[in-house]
Image (cartoon, helix red, strand yellow):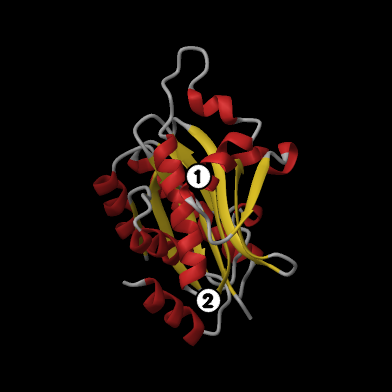
Amino acid sequence: ASIEAIIEKVRKEKRRFLLANEGQGVMKAAGISIPKSSLARGLDQAVQCAEEIGYPLVMKIVSKDILHKSDVGGVALNLVNKKEVIEAYEAIIHNCRAASPDAKIEGVEITEMVHKGTELIVGARIDPSFGPIVMCGLGGIYVEVMKDVSFRALPLSLKEAITMIKEIRSYPLLLGVRGEKKKDIDGLVETILKVGEILQRCRSISDIEINPLVVDEEGVKAVDVRILLSP
């Protein structure tokens, strides 16, 4: 589906935030790599999807009524066999029903676990003071702690995107430390430019955040994507 078609569906359902699979759909349409994933609407389908994608896996609840999945026990990581998939599915559904009895649950998203690589955050948003901006920095669990991010106004040139990356204190991690190979910096630059383009092209999007964007020597993958529409 095109980005516009995905947004239209969300608007029709009177929502402001995109579900995980819709966010991944936007990435795919923009040409940004994402992990293999499937939406399973029941236990049998979850087991089938897991076998098709291959282990290890991540499982997350899909519900427009549940924003913070981890807080309600709606996420399971590093599932390595069928037994763990069944247990995780049952636990996630139980946890989410207990935490939000009225939530409409679409199912669970099953995704390949992306292990190796440096976790970064790449995003774009409409800033009340500066207008459309992009950001890049150290991601994963370190975002809040390290606050190692750089910002630029849109539109963004290739040169500015490269400078942005070099500004972050964690830049040496991308060059490869302690015998590690150099990460795919070109792929990261391309992703920053594409995220900026999405925001400029789709005026109804107010926020895009990829965290983490996992960067290794072979490429980049947008593991977790949050997209918010303007009111």
- SS for callout 1: helix
Q: Is residue 8 left or right of residue 64?
A: left
* Tag 1: amino acid: Lys
Q: Position of residue 79 (x, y in %)?
A: 42, 39
Of badges 1 and 2, the one in the foreground is 1
Q: Please tell me which of labels 1 and 2 falls first in the chain.
A: 1
Reply above or below: 20 against 191.
below
- SS for callout 2: loop
At label 1, counting other C-alpha atoms closer than 10 Å, the crowd grade (few under 14, some 14-19, many 20 or more) is few
Quadrant location, the C terminus: bottom right
* Tag 2: amino acid: Arg
| Residue at which label 2 appears | 203
| Residue at which label 1 appears | 159
- For the question of whether residue 231 can be seen, the reply is yes
Q: Position of residue 149 (x, y in %)?
A: 66, 43
On the image, which quarter does residue 67 sit in?
Answer: bottom right
Reply above or below: 176 against 31.
above
Residue at 66% across, 54% down = 71
Reply above or below: 68 against 186.
below
Quadrant location, the N terminus: bottom left
Residue at 40% across, 77% down = 4
Of all residues, the one furthest to the top in this rendering is 179
Q: Is residue 117 left or right of residue 112?
A: right
Q: Position of residue 185 (x, y in %)?
A: 44, 35
Q: Position of residue 52 (x, y in %)?
A: 24, 48
Q: Is residue 24 left or right of residue 100?
A: left
Residue 132 or 101: which is nearer the viewer? 132
